[in-house]
Amino acid sequence: MNNEEKILVLLEKQSTVLDTLVKGQEETNQRLDKLETDVSVLKTDVSSLKTDVSSLKTDVSVLKTDLAETKELVILMEHDNKQQFGILHDGYKLVYDKLEPIPPIIENLQEDIFVIKSVITAHSQDISTLMVAT
């Protein structure tokens, strides 16, 4: 084999290797294109997630504010209710204090009525007896 043939064989091998490298480079480029597309999709997803997280932070902030306001209202209501229940209790106590002496009075009146009934019954019998006698 002469030098020219050796050079041709080397050129053919080099051409084959170069074709293999070019083909590999094309495959690598295709994979990189897919990766770039995937990264782009991921960036979009991350951006969407950031927006969602920001919205959630705002919602949580609003909820915290509402909770603080609700706690304040509950404290005010408890205070007002304690005062109102105190006033209501005082009113009931006044009524109770006024009504407390009434049951013994009623008992005395019942006894008096019983005595009056007895007297009326006795008088009625006496009148009937007198009327029969006359």
Image (spheres, rainbow, N blue to C red):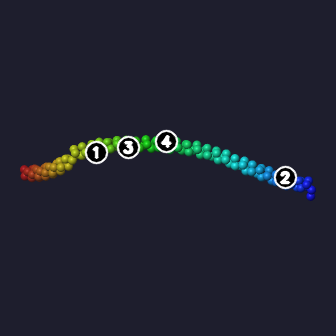
Q: Earlier in the sequence, mark 4 or mark 3?
A: 4
User: x%, y% of residue 60?
Assistant: 50, 44
Distance Cα–Cα, label 3 vs label 2: 87 Å
Residue 75: which disc? 3
Q: Residue furthest right?
A: 2
| Residue at the disc numbered 2 | 15
- How packed mark 3 is, by other alpha carbons closer than 10 Å (few <14, some 14-19, many 20 or more), is few
Q: Earlier in the sequence, mark 4 or mark 1?
A: 4
- How packed mark 1 is, by other alpha carbons closer than 10 Å (few <14, some 14-19, many 20 or more), is few
Secondary structure beneath disc 1?
A: helix
Q: Earlier in the sequence, mark 2 or mark 1?
A: 2
Distance Cα–Cα, label 4 vs label 1: 39 Å
Q: Which residue is at a point 52% across and 43% down the rendered structure image?
A: 57
Q: Amino acid at mark 1?
A: His
Q: Earlier in the sequence, mark 2 or mark 4?
A: 2
Would residue 119 be found to the left or right of residue 94 on screen?
left
| Residue at the disc numbered 1 | 89
Q: Amino acid at mark 3?
A: Ile
Would residue 51 be found to the left or right of residue 24 on screen?
left
Secondary structure beneath disc 2?
A: helix
Q: Amino acid at mark 2?
A: Ser
Front-lying residue, 89 or 103: 89
